[in-house]
Image (spheres, rainbow, N blue to C red):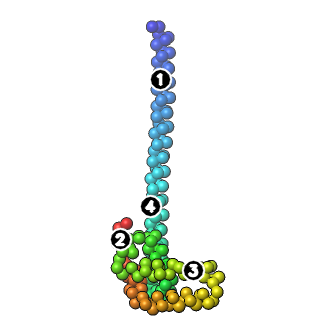
């Protein structure tokens, strides 16, 4: 082989090696960037989930405190707590102290709420209100026990 051919092949291989090294470096940096973005995304999702849990815990405590203090109607509080607990940890309903919340929710699902309530004739509102009053009277003490239980529940110590 001639020296010109050998030098030409060497130059070609050097150029190819440099090109491949650049390509490897570029792919490696892209992979590192993607890993960093994924890690940041995981952290952002974890933070958002924790903020949601904190919001639910705060809401549960506020409603429970309001029920204990008589600032929130017991039935309305039970309905709100049921939804919040479902979103926080549905297993929490298995606590014997909280079964009344599920009971009150179930017994009032047929009663219209929000705009549907507002559009009811007064006569129908009165019928439903009597039913609500009767349920509250029957379960008032157990509901207050549930509200105190939730007000003092150690949510921070709970592992999810």
Q: Distance between the residues labelled 1 and 3?
A: 79 Å
Q: How far apart are marks 1 and 2 (CA)?
A: 62 Å
> Considering only vertical position in the picture, is 114 above or below 87?
below
Q: In terms of depth relative to the viewer, which is nearer, 61 or 1? A: 61
Q: Which mark is residue 46?
A: 4
Could you tell me if the residues under marks 2 and 4 are in contact, i.e. CB atoms within 8 Å? no
Front disc: 4 or 1: 4
Crowding at label 4, few (<14), some or many (≥20) Cα neighbours within 10 Å?
few
Quadrant in the picture for the C terminus: bottom left
Residue at which label 3 appears = 112
Where disc 3 sits, the SS reads loop
Residue shown at the point (35%, 77%) measured from the top left: 95
Front disc: 2 or 4: 2
Front disc: 3 or 2: 3
Marks 1 and 2, the one that precedes in the sequence: 1
Front disc: 1 or 2: 2
Where disc 2 sits, the SS reads loop
Residue at which label 1 appears = 14
> Considering only vertical position in the picture, is 159 above or below 30?
below
Could you tell me if the residues under marks 1 and 3 are in contact, i.e. CB atoms within 8 Å? no
Q: Which mark is residue 158?
A: 2
Could you tell me if the residues under marks 1 and 2 are in contact, i.e. CB atoms within 8 Å? no
Where disc 1 sits, the SS reads helix
């Amino acid at each position: 082989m001639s020296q010109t051919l050998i030098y030409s092949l060497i130059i070609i291989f050097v150029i190819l090696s440099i090109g491949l090294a650049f390509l490897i470096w570029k792919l490696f940096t892209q992979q590192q960037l993607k890993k960093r973005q994924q890690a940041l995304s995981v952290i952002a999702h974890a933070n958002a989930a924790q903020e949601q849990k904190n919001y639910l815990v705060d809401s549960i405590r506020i409603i429970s405190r309001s029920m204990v203090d008589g600032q929130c109607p017991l039935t309305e509080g039970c309905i709100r707590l049921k939804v919040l607990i479902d979103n926080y940890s549905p297993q929490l309903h298995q606590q014997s102290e909280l079964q009344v919340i599920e009971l009150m929710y179930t017994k009032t699902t047929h009663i219209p709420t929000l705009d549907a309530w507002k559009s009811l004739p007064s006569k129908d509102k009165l019928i439903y209100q009597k039913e609500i009053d009767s349920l509250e009277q029957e379960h008032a003490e157990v509901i207050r026990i549930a509200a105190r239980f939730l007000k003092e529940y150690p949510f921070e110590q709970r592992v999810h």
